[in-house]
Image (cartoon, rainbow, N blue to C red):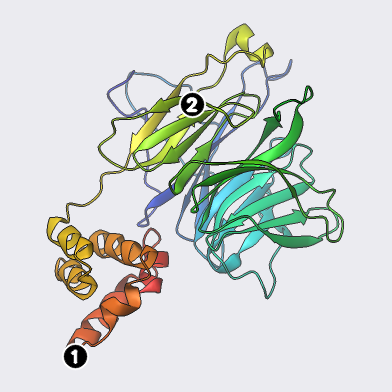
Amino acid sequence: HYKSPLFLTTIGSTVPTHVQWSTSKASKSNPAPKQDLYVSSGPRITMFKNVPTLSPSEPSKMEAARKYTFPSPVTSFSIRPSDGLILVGGEKGMLKVVNSVTKTTMRTFEGKNLKSNVTSTCWSDDGGTIFAGGDNGEGIWGNVVTGNMGKWKVGDGAVRGVKMGRWKKEGEDEPVKGFITGGGDGFVRVWAPGLGGVGSLPSLVMSRSLRGPVSFVERQHNSRITIVGVGKEVVVLDEGLREVGRCTGNAKTVTSGVVGEIDGDRGKNEGNDNEAFEVRIDKKPKLSAVTKAVKGFQYGKALTTALRTRNVRDVAAVTSELWGRDGLTTAVAGRTTEEVEEIFHFVCRYVCHPGYGGTVAKL
């Protein structure tokens, strides 16, 4: 409802990538719940403790309480509700469980075969198992107590969104506990977690094709609906993955969304489907000349045109499109020494960029 900022702060020179709230429960000694805010940017997570109550008057100044620094840029993180442990995923297969108070690493789930960038993270209901997805279509599970871990094939393309919930297959009365994943292959899938032992891989419960790469998956844990971004549309699914709604007419690709909290007495009734959701639209760069070149299969011309803009966002957009068309090698082939140096200098400058470094690295 408010048209002015509620909080103002600066977290550094890098671009914020993920934001998550951690709310403590009210008690007799502490009747007012506290809200801590966690923001990732580059290789670190910044925590703002006890963020003040929302007020439409003047913006409050948030002061950073803790900073957590990691060896690789953070690409996803999830907070365990029971005690605040942080599951942190990053580039080059970084996957750690960190104590939010002492900042110590409690468990590391990394191995020689885990080389993908982690795109999604999630805790199991009991907090004993972690799940994550990579940009190579693989899923990772790990037992926090024993340290056992494993991988399984989720699908093709990057895994977008790993969210716990309860799901009901058609013809069955009792819902099952599991988690949903979205993929670059256009499928959403529901998985039943293993028991966390050696070789205990999640099993597929059900799946649905949405006919387009999934950009995000979002739901509240006790909700009966899930919202999924597919291109310029948002699809609303029920607990059986049946489509119950669709948000259309967006001019741009939908990149994220939020399912509203159920408040008041409605929170006691999981059967209420009247939740609201909102979406945010990504403003893509205007690349009319590049678009024409790509559609005409002039991949080299498209890349050169983007490079001449000297805009990392434009080049990343073209690189991603050519990569998806398997045309990036064609785009860089047959270039002169000067043209190769132009690409090389651009890559050296932006390969560590927190927002576009992963895409630039493909180039």
In the picture of the structure, the residue carrying the numbered disc 1 is 336
Query: Residue 348's x, y, as percent?
Result: 33, 78
Q: Which amino acid lies under the numbered mark 2 shown in the image of this protein?
A: Pro
212 shown above or below 74: above
At 50% from the left and 53% from the top, the residue drawn is 185
Label 1 CA crowd tier, 10 Å (few <14, some 14–19, many 20+): few
Query: Residue 173's x, y, as percent?
Result: 78, 22
Q: Nearer the viewer, mark 2 or mark 1?
A: 1
Q: Which amino acid lies under the numbered mark 1 shown in the image of this protein?
A: Thr
29 shown above or below 135: above
The reply to whether residue 245 is visible in this rendering is: yes
Q: CA distance from mark 2 to mark 1?
A: 58 Å
At 75% from the left and 56% from the top, the residue drawn is 142
Label 2–label 1 contact, CB within 8 A: no
Query: Residue 363's x, y, as percent?
Result: 35, 74
Secondary structure of the residue carrying numbered label 2: loop
Secondary structure of the residue carrying numbered label 1: loop
Label at residue 37:
none
The quarter of the picture where the N terminus appears is top left
Q: Nearer the viewer, residue 14 or 352?
A: 352
Q: Give the mark nearer the N terminus: 2 vs 1.
A: 2
Quarter-of-image position of residue 127:
top right
In the picture of the structure, the residue carrying the numbered disc 2 is 52
